[in-house]
Image (spheres, helix red, strand yellow):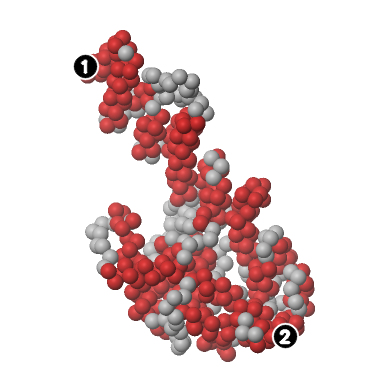
Amino acid sequence: MVEMRWDKALSVAPGVSVKYWKKLMQRRADQLIQEDKDDVIPYCIAIGDVKKLVHFFMSRGRLKEALLVAQAACEGNMQPLHVSMPKGASYSDDIYKEDFNELLHKVSKELAEWYFQDGRAVLAACCHLAVDNIELAMAYLIRGNELELAVCVGTVLGESAAPATHYALELLARKCMMISICFPSVGYRNLAADLLLMIPDNELHLIKLCAFYPGCTEEINDLHDKCKLPTVEECIQLAETAHADDNIFETVKYYLLSQEPEKALPIGISFVKEYISSSDWTLDTIYPVLDLLSYIRTEKLLLHTCTEARNELLILCGYTGALLAIRRQYQSIVPALYEYTSQLLKRREVSVPLKIEYLSEELDAWRACTQSTSRSLEDSPYTPPSDSQRMVYATLLKRLKEESLKGIIGPDYVTGSNLPSHSDIHISCLTGLKIQGPVFFLEDGKSAISLNDALMWAKVNPFSPLGTGIRLNPF
């Protein structure tokens, strides 16, 4: 009976006025939305209430339908009903286009995020490309570990995608550098160099490649020549000159490229320890030196004579990795990186200006100040951070500064991340939880972590979670 009354009322309403009919249609649409009925769709279409229809679909997770409506509105196929149109005005006015275009971007972003968290990075990138959001499209391909596709797409898009393309090339080169079976195969070595040569400002990337390459002197010099770098014999002289001039970065750089790369370790580590002993240091000051040191040839780093320097390097890289993970919002690995650093401090004899107690305070402050964003997903009640925790977290944020490539902020989700585990269940050595989706095995062949966590870990800390000094290569 109620339905019949509404139908009769709406059928006679235009006889009163179009304005009254539209108002009655809106009331009926609101009622149907509250009743969660799809019958609201023709009502919204009839009066051109695009926003209400889009929000109806979005609130119910029907993002594809919401996108279809928003796209139709942008193309002029769903025109809002104007009871009294200003003279000279039309639907094509910029105000309506901008309004619906903003709505389209909002729906596309939400659909892309849904695809991405479902382990479908390519479809997520397509959603962003459809609305010309190149930065996020490239970021989702990189965060989904679709590096080859990211480079191809970025190359086609050109300058607008250049920063992300260069980052993808860097990660692809790392993949070639670290292929355990084939590297130092000349083919993979040259491929890594060719990829890095595609980056305009490539000198530092090429230095890292040459520093890590473990061939004989003749092969190394051949690679240096390809990368337009001095020979290993010349590098030792340049390192000594830079050291005499107290130029730390140049000293570390040329020692790593020489026949005695282990000499770079104490110099670079002393510089970092001195900086973090002060109260006003920042991550961007120490990270470039640590990042460069991490490319020392593995067989040199594992020498017995380098034990103390190796342990200190692992601890410093672990701590800066935790800070980078916070900056990039890699929430799942932040506690593991702090625990990794604390365990190394506890078990190995080192002299670094870091204390386990302070690391615990920092981790607790990070948890307390960031849990408000996720407390709705947890059963435990929200406890506001204390004043001391706010102070520690504020100091932490000052050290982090901002990420230069903002599009890469956020966790990684590779293809198949949401697929259920098969009968061969693996437990993550980082979280202690069952791994869902692709598994990555560490160098001992037994310890496992999720591929998502492995990718995020390798992007902020190049060394294995097992503390062996072996570099991680999940790319």
Q: On screen, 107 above or below 444?
A: above
Q: Is residue 447 visible?
A: no
Which badge, 1 or 2, is on the more N-terminal residue?
A: 1
CB under 8 Å between discs 1 and 2? no
Position of 473 compared to 183: left or right? left
Q: Secondary structure at mark 1?
A: loop
* Residue located at (66% from left, 83% from top): 242
Residue 185 x, y percent position in the rendering:
71, 69
Location of the C terminus by quadrant is bottom right
Residue placed most toward the observer, 320 or 177: 320
Quadrant assignment for the N terminus:
top left
Of the residues shown, which amino acid type is indicated by label 2?
Gln
Vertical placement of residue 3 versus 220, above or below: above
Q: Quadrant of residue 365?
A: bottom left
Q: Residue at x 31, y 9 (%)?
A: 15
Hey, what amino acid is under mark 1?
Answer: Met
Residue 237 marker: 2
Please identify the quarter of the rendering in which residue 64 is found. Answer: top left
Question: Which label sits on residue 463?
Answer: none
- How many neighbours does mark 1 have within 10 angstroms: few (below 14), some (14-19), or many (20 or more)? few
Q: Is residue 363 above or below residue 20?
A: below
Residue 10 x, y percent position in the rendering = 30, 15
Q: Secondary structure at mark 2?
A: helix
Query: Which residue was labeled with disc 1?
Result: 1
Q: Is residue 469 visible?
A: yes
Q: Is residue 427 left or right of 218 when viewed as pictured?
A: left
Residue at 45% in and 34% down: 99
Q: Is residue 348 above or below residue 93?
A: below
